[in-house]
Amino acid sequence: MNLIIVDDNKKFGENLEQCLTQELKHTVVARFENGEDLLSYFDKSQRITPDIILIDIEMPKLNGILTAKKLLWDNIYLKIIAITMYEDKAYLTELLSTGFKGCIFKANIQNIEAALNSVYSNQLYFPDDILFSEKDKI
């Protein structure tokens, strides 16, 4: 699979890229540290379209939710997986309504292969313990 990583934590991004390329044998076509740079990448005419984009939810400049919304506005076919260390801020309803096809918690990154395979096969992948937003609770 061709993948793009967007995460403001440079060390995490490097480690994730190493895992994806060396252990799982995927290709990381680009890595960015913020959403603005990813959007600029998609504004260019000569680019590789990824199979899946992995986007951190919490980033400076433009967070992952707004980045995904802007990206999907013109590229509805893209498959995006949220990655986050904030399990208490990852709300299933918000991610689904934004257009994310999956979510991985950084604390459980060993699930990355299952998430990639599910989303690549046009299935959703969300952790069992992901939260619903407050407004969805009865």
Image: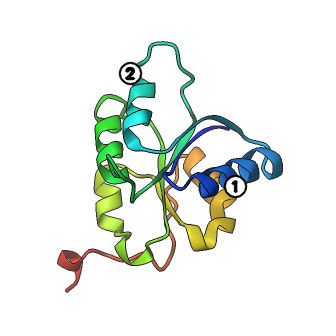
The residue lying at 32 percent from left, 47 percent from top is 62
The residue lying at 39 percent from left, 42 percent from top is 35
Task: Tell me whether circle 1 and circle 2 mark residues in contact (CB < 8 Å).
Answer: no
- Where is mark 2, residue-wise? 43
In which quadrant will I find the C terminus? bottom left
Q: 123 or 87, which lies in front?
A: 87
* Mark number displayed over residue 31: none
Q: 125 or 36, which lies in front?
A: 36
In this figure, what is the number of numbered marks?
2
The residue lying at 45 percent from left, 26 percent from top is 41
Depth check, mark 1 against mark 2: the one in front is: 1
- The part of the image, by quadrant, that contains residue 5 is top right
Residue 128, given in percent of the width and then of the height, sits at: 50, 77
- Where is mark 1, residue-wise? 15
Residue 134, given in percent of the width and then of the height, sits at: 22, 79
Q: Secondary structure beneath disc 2?
A: helix
Q: Quick check: can you spot residue 60?
A: yes
Disc 1 marks which amino acid? Asn
